[in-house]
Amino acid sequence: MTRIHIRSLSALALLLGVASAQGTTTVRLGYFPNLTHAPALIGLERGTFQRALGKVKLDARSFVSGTTLTEAFAAGQIDLAYIGPGPAINAATRGMPLQIIAGASEAGAVLMARGDSGIRTHADLAGKRVAVPSLGNTQDISLRHLLKEEGLRPQTDGGTVTITPVAPADIAAAFAGKRVDAALVPEPWGALLQAHGHRLIGSEKTVWRGGRYPTTLVIVNTRFAQANPALVANFLKAHADAVAYLNKNPAAARTLINAQLDKLTGQKIDLRVLQRAMTRTRFTTALDLDALTEYAALNVEAGYARSVPDLRSFVRLGTTR
């Protein structure tokens, strides 16, 4: 397994290739209200991101999915972002100026079925309506691979499974209204569905690769990185601090995460539900290039790309070991 780790934040300016900032007054950060983006939630709730940026203002913006975030990224509205590998790879291969500069989380996605849907196995998804956060996002690509392994196909490819986009925070309402039968959803929304009596069909380990797959990465606009290496280095230091806090203080972290989720979605989640969700999610700054490359192949398999790119050309920080 090839893993890339942040080795030297002081060397970041050399790695990014520019020595001085260009008078930036605001850093625009994109992220999602999901547990898989917990480093972002922690950094915001503890104020460590803003402190790391000093006098430069942090403008943090929450998005529903990687699809909507990459649209904002393409429009030049985002400088740094937490995002899934699917949208990140798609954006890079379409020529968007981005660099993958750190990992944030692994696993943390589960396949849930509505309690009265009759679904008990992956094979039972035939003829059902399955929700993902958005078409082309990380869970969508994973679902399409899972269906292929079961000999199933989406309705758009001549099969019987209807894949429909639903924001993760709205999945519980979609289940209650019987608008979908199942969902491949990031945590903590899967654990919340389980607490409501719905059925876990696929754990984070059965979704793909035994659970050793990236769910969230940190990306930066290439031009912003070149113009502001010190700001990016300081942000990455705060990101690493947030990951360390999550791993060293999980109980305190759950309270902070819950506060952010309540602000962003209007939903307070039982801390026991968050605890279950956190057992299915790993937080790390490392980048697993082997897993990313395999994921890029799934992206091609899903029909969202024509070929697997050389991902090393998009990874700009760290050392391979």
Image (cartoon, helix red, strand yellow):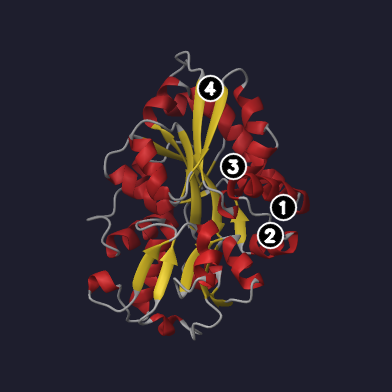
**Residue 230, disc:** 4
Which mark is first along the chain, 2 or 3?
3
Residue at x 55% of width, y 68% of height? 204
Q: Nearer the viewer, mark 2 or mark 4?
A: 2
Q: Secondary structure at mark 1?
A: helix
* Residue that label 2 marks: 274
Residue at x 47% of width, y 67% of height? 184
Give the residue type at disc 3.
Answer: Ala
**Residue 8 seen:** no
Give the residue type at disc 4.
Answer: Ala
**Residue 254, disc:** 1
- Kindly indicate whether the residue at mark 2 contacts the one at mark 1 (C-beta within 8 angstroms): yes
* Residue 30 percent across, percent down from the top left: 49, 39
How far is the residue under mark 2 from the one under mark 4? Answer: 35 Å
64 horizontally vs 198: left or right? left
Q: Nearer the viewer, residue 45 or 297?
A: 45
How far is the residue under mark 4 from the one under mark 1? Answer: 30 Å
How far is the residue under mark 3 from the one under mark 4? Answer: 19 Å
Q: Nearer the viewer, residue 249 or 158?
A: 158
- Kindly indicate whether the residue at mark 1 contacts the one at mark 4 (C-beta within 8 angstroms): no
- Kindly indicate whether the residue at mark 1 contacts the one at mark 3 (C-beta within 8 angstroms): no
Q: Residues within 10 Å of mark 3 (few under 14, many from 20)?
A: many
Q: Secondary structure at mark 4?
A: helix
